[in-house]
Image (spheres, helix red, strand yellow):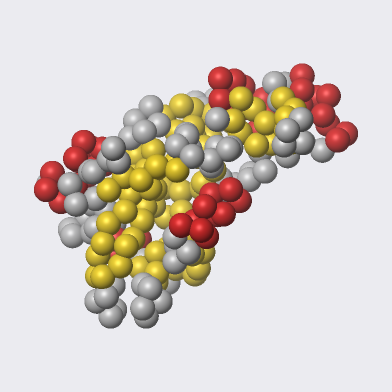
């Protein structure tokens, strides 16, 4: 796995000196996963500048069925998870850094995703779309009902009392399935995440392929 970079021709020598590599096959620049300790050096060439989370390979989707809040039709809904990830942050000296977050996390309130991840979603889950969230008062990537097309807000699916992606018991977590997808380049998102008890339950008891 590697991270796709957008390097202008005038900056290719500088990018190469900072660790970027050129793929003759793809005719594009990238940073190998083994060199992610140099993420801060090549940060300016990451195409998505707002997103602050780099997902590992494979991309993990959590999926399960739940009724639409409006028409009550049973739908397959999805959420994103990762066994670990890289997060852009500021250190104690207010310097920009990329941190390896080595724990299982569930992502919600997704503001932006990289083009390669959008292509995957358009193919596999076209009802997961970028729309205006009335609850969050901003644009988010949200699930939709396949019948009435109503938005399924994260506040509904991640509700701490009875949300689909917020299990309170191992039995509830066992109703979820983890699905993996391989991409040529690392996916990038801008999102919030949680690593609480419900994330532990999903990591331990959700169904894994194979």
Q: Is residue 93 visible?
A: yes
As drawn, is 89 to the left or to the right of 205? right
The percent position of residue 123, horizontal first and vertical second, equals: 51, 58
* Residue at screen point 59% across, 30% down: 2
Q: Position of residue 34 (x, y in %)?
A: 56, 20
Q: Quadrant of the N terminus?
A: top right
Outermost residue, front direction?
Answer: 210
Let me know if residue 137 appears in the view. no
Q: Residue at x 47, y 34 (%)?
A: 56
Give coordinates of residue 158: x percent, y percent: 29, 56
197 with respect to 29 (left or right): left
Residue 25's x, y, as percent? 73, 33
Count the numbered circles shown: 0
Q: Residue at x 36, y 52 (%)?
A: 79
Judge whether 91 appears above or below 188 on screen.
above
Q: In the image, 108: left or right of 117?
A: left
Q: Residue furthest right?
A: 10
* Placement of 204 over or under 34, stated as above or below: below
| As drawn, 82 above or below 111 | above
- Considering the image in quadrants, where does the C terminus appear? top left
State which quadrant residue 42 falls in.
Answer: top right
Front position in the image: 126 or 5: 126
Q: Image point 36% across, 66% down: which residue?
A: 153
């Amino acid at each position: 796995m590697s991270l796709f970079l957008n390097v202008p021709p005038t900056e290719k020598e500088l990018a190469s000196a900072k660790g970027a590599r050129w793929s003759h096959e793809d005719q594009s620049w990238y940073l190998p996963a083994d060199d992610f300790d140099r993420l801060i050096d090549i940060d300016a060439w990451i195409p998505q500048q707002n997103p602050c989370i780099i997902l590992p390979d494979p991309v993990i989707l959590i999926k399960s069925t739940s009724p639409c809040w409006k028409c009550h039709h049973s739908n397959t809904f999805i959420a994103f998870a990762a066994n670990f990830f890289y997060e852009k942050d500021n250190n104690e000296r207010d310097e920009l850094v990329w941190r390896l977050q080595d724990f299982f996390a569930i992502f919600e309130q997704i503001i932006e995703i990289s083009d390669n991840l959008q292509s995957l979603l358009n193919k596999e889950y076209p009802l997961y779309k970028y729309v205006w969230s009335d609850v969050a008062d901003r644009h988010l990537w949200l699930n939709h009902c396949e019948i009435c097309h109503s938005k399924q807000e994260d506040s509904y699916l991640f509700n701490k009392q009875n949300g689909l992606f917020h299990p309170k018991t191992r039995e509830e977590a066992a109703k979820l399935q983890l699905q993996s997808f391989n991409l040529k380049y690392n996916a990038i998102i801008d999102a919030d995440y949680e690593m609480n008890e419900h994330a532990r339950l999903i990591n331990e008891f959700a169904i894994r392929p194979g």
